[in-house]
Amino acid sequence: MAEADRFGPSSPTRRHRTGGAPGTPRPELGPVVAELAADGIVPVLLGGRREEVPERYERAVKPVSVPVLEVLGDRDDVVPLRYAAHPNAEFLQARNANHFDVIDPGHPSWGLVRGWLAAH
């Protein structure tokens, strides 16, 4: 995989900008998770690549029958924009938000989520 296609900062000496979500009991784990997910979070979550655990991938890609919202911060330095906008999800980009801001209900970006939920 080309370095440009990796998720997030990959150098162990590079300072990670995202840190952890506010209020997280272990914010120092933010960079660790980002490094584990450098080649994509799916193999981390499913315990291997598609060719290693094909049965897990088959179960994981079942179509969903509920509305799905995908939110990405415009300052996200973990997930590049090119990996966003899943074809079966409504995509919203949060202004002035990093990777962890969009999962913090206290962050202003959650106004997007609340608005979307109210509409659905």
Image (tube, grey):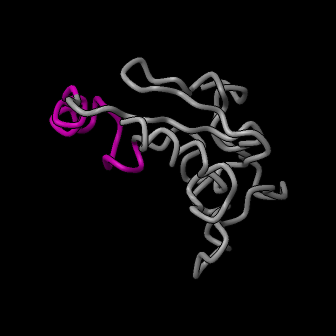
Task: Give how far across and how far down residue 75 sits, in percent.
Answer: 77, 41
Count the labels in the image.
0
Q: Position of 46 compared to 75: left or right? A: left
Which residue in the rendered view is the most extreme toward the top? Answer: 87
Residue at figure coordinates x 58%, y 82% from the top left: 25
Which residue in the rendered view is the most extreme toward the front? Answer: 118
Residue at figure coordinates x 55%, y 53% from the top left: 36
Task: Point out the image quarter for the N terminus.
Answer: top right
Task: Give how far across and how far down residue 64 sits, in percent.
Answer: 23, 30
Decide whether residue 80 is among the magenta residues: no
Task: Give how far across and how far down residue 10 sits, in percent.
Answer: 71, 46
Task: Give how far across and how far down residue 87 sits, in percent.
Answer: 41, 17
Residue 6: name its quadrant. Answer: top right
Along the viewing direction, whichever of 67 and 5 lies nearer the viewer: 67
Q: Which residues are magenta?
A: 43-63
Q: Position of 16 compared to 7: left or right? A: right
Decide whether residue 44 is among the magenta residues: yes
In the rendered image of this protein, does residue 111 appear above or below residue 31?
A: above
